[in-house]
Image (cartoon, rainbow, N blue to C red):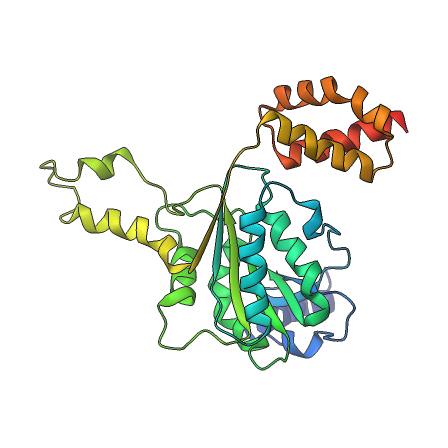
Amino acid sequence: MTTLEHFLARAELLMTRLENLLPAQAASVIDWNSPTSAFRWRKKNGRGVLSPIAHISPISLPDLFFVERQKALLEQNTRQFLQGKPANNVLLTGARGTGKSSLVKACLNEFSDKGLRLIEVDKNDLVDLDEISDLIASRPEYFILYCDDLSFDEGDSSYKALKVALDGSVAAQPDNILIYATSNRRHLLPEKMSDNEGYSHNENGDLHPSETVEEKISFSDRFGLWLSFYPYNQEEYLFITAHWLRSFGCSEDQIAQAREEALQWALHRGSRSGRTAWQFARDYAGRVL
């Protein structure tokens, strides 16, 4: 390598390091007039940016069945939010594939023309919640910060960031921001058998085990609204399967003939869920149409 090439390589390395130390300039590159209503928070060169999501799931509220109570509560909470009335952060928990994330997406599609926007935040980026809030707090739109499939391990730093954002900071949560999160766990922190053995005389044990257990359980309480989802029975699963088969253009005769295959599909997956029904419908319609 020549002296000039060596100098240029060193200069490029130095510039990269300096860029990583500069404050984020995400707000200046966000196109708020973009036709999309959803964004994803991403890290680039150590800095956070809001990236528009070009293709959003088209699912709508009428596509969701057997979750009428959950649907009504989330829709009402979101409507209050958009009207500038008090509304709650929401935790949607329960069995996998039963419509938790689909309900959030359907709400976005229902209310996007009324100013609702969604920002998807990965669990590992929850430490940036303050930065995200600063970017959007003065905007006229209403934002849902969406965390999908949320759970935490022991000592996870993102847990404390979310805890503070929900209910632990001196600064109040901006009126145009809510947090919606989905999880397969009702209690987002892991609970261990040893938590129930806290009163044993272990010199390395927790001095106040009841307080440790209480912290793990109470974290979910920081969400004002809990919505629980449950597995479907066989007839509910077949009803949802038929709905998706119709949406793909299958005839009633084809839907009737698909019944046994749909049950076998669910048996092999070990789950009668809305997701399983949708996946089977895509496979079956692709084969018979």
User: On the picture, is 19 further left or further right than 4?
Assistant: left
Placement of the N terminus among the 4 image quadrants: bottom right
Q: Residue 74 falls in which quadrant of the image? A: bottom right
Q: Is residue 3 visible?
A: no
Residue 65 placed where, x, y %? 64, 42
Residue 246 placed where, x, y %? 81, 36
Q: Identify the residue shown where x is 13% and y is 48%.
A: 207
Give the answer, above or below, for where 177 lies relative to 254.
Answer: below
Placement of the C terminus among the 4 image quadrants: top right
Of residues 28 and 106, the one nearer the viewer is 106
Q: Residue 98 falls in which quadrant of the image? A: top right
Q: Residue 157 falls in which quadrant of the image? A: bottom left
Q: Identify the residue shown where x is 68% and y is 79%.
A: 28
Residue farthest left in this picture? 201
Residue farthest bottom in this picture? 138
User: On the picture, is 174 further left or further right than 113?
Assistant: left
Residue 138 placed where, x, y %? 58, 82
Q: Is residue 139 visible?
A: yes
Residue 97 placed where, x, y %? 59, 38
Q: Identify the residue shown where x is 68% and y is 18%.
A: 264
Of residues 76 and 266, the one nearer the viewer is 76
> What is the number of callouts on the image?
0
Give the answer, above or below, for where 224 lies relative to 234.
Answer: below
